[in-house]
Image: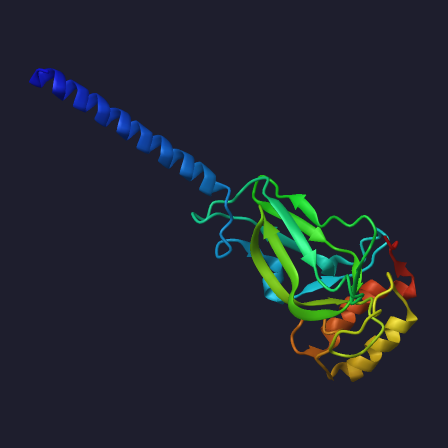
Amino acid sequence: MGLLAYQVLSEDYGMKRLLMIVCALALATAANADVPDPSQCLSSLDDTGRLYMCPDDNTGDCAAADFTVTVKNANNDVIPNATVEILVGGQVDGYTVICAGEVLVQNANANGVAMFNIAGGGCYKAADACVIRANGVEIRTYDTVVSADYSFSDNGNTVGGGDYDVDPVDLGAFVAAYQGGVGPTSCHDYNNDGGTEPVDLGTFVAAYQGGINFCDAP
């Protein structure tokens, strides 16, 4: 084989190899674009480190339960249409209850944002009490789930504390935990700041609605 022919073959092989590398990099980049990076993702629940739920018969009384999740990849780019899933612990043992028809899985919008408001009750404090996944990747975990629908004034996990409505029994439990606005941390410490205080009273009143706020059991 002549030197010129050898050089042409070598250049052709090198070009093909370069194209293969470029294609592989492009495929890897495209794949990674849909992989969430927990350190770049955002959740409005980070402000309180807990999930607050409230039974609501679609009257919009439980705005305090609104939260958002923003899904991003390692390049800090948003991931449109990412599948976001909220896992609430304690249901199997009866520490928490989720109202019928609640949306716990949805797709993010074009800006990578998914919005949730989960109707439910009870209180659960344990590792992974609330877990958020995006495209199958665990991006957040919280160790506290609370609700105005909770019929005890403790700071732990009591089975049967939620019954799908915020009624006078829950009011009595809140008052016992509140202690005139200087109560210690409890399952009625909805903003998870270490005390049951006036700000928690505002959240409870919005959920209570005269003792008639409810949702349907599954």
Residue sitting nearer the eye, 208 or 173: 173
Quadrant holding the N terminus: top left
Q: Position of residue 43 (x, y in %)?
A: 59, 57
Residue drawn at point x = 63 percent, y = 59 percent: 131
Q: Reply above or below: 84 against 121.
A: above
Residue drawn at point x = 84 percent, y = 69 percent: 160
Q: Can you name the residue that lies furthest to the left here? A: 3
- Say how many tags the image has: 0
- Left or right: 61, with 2 as reference point: right
Residue drawn at point x = 45 percent, y = 37 percent: 30
Q: Can you name the residue that lies furthest to the front here? A: 1
Residue sitting nearer the eye, 197 or 99: 99
Residue drawn at point x = 7 percent, y = 18 percent: 3
Q: Reply above or below: 26 against 213.
A: above
Q: Is residue 191 at all visible to an observer of this figure? A: no
Q: Position of residue 49 (x, y in %)?
A: 62, 67
- Left or right: 18, with 38 as reference point: left
Q: Position of residue 64 (x, y in %)?
A: 73, 61
Residue sitting nearer the eye, 18 or 38: 18
Question: Residue 96 occupies which quadrant of the picture?
Answer: bottom right
Q: Position of residue 66 (x, y in %)?
A: 70, 56
Coloration mode: rainbow
Question: Residue 165 occupies which quadrant of the picture?
Answer: bottom right
Q: Is residue 186 at all visible to an observer of this figure? A: yes
Q: Reply above or below: 30 against 85.
A: above
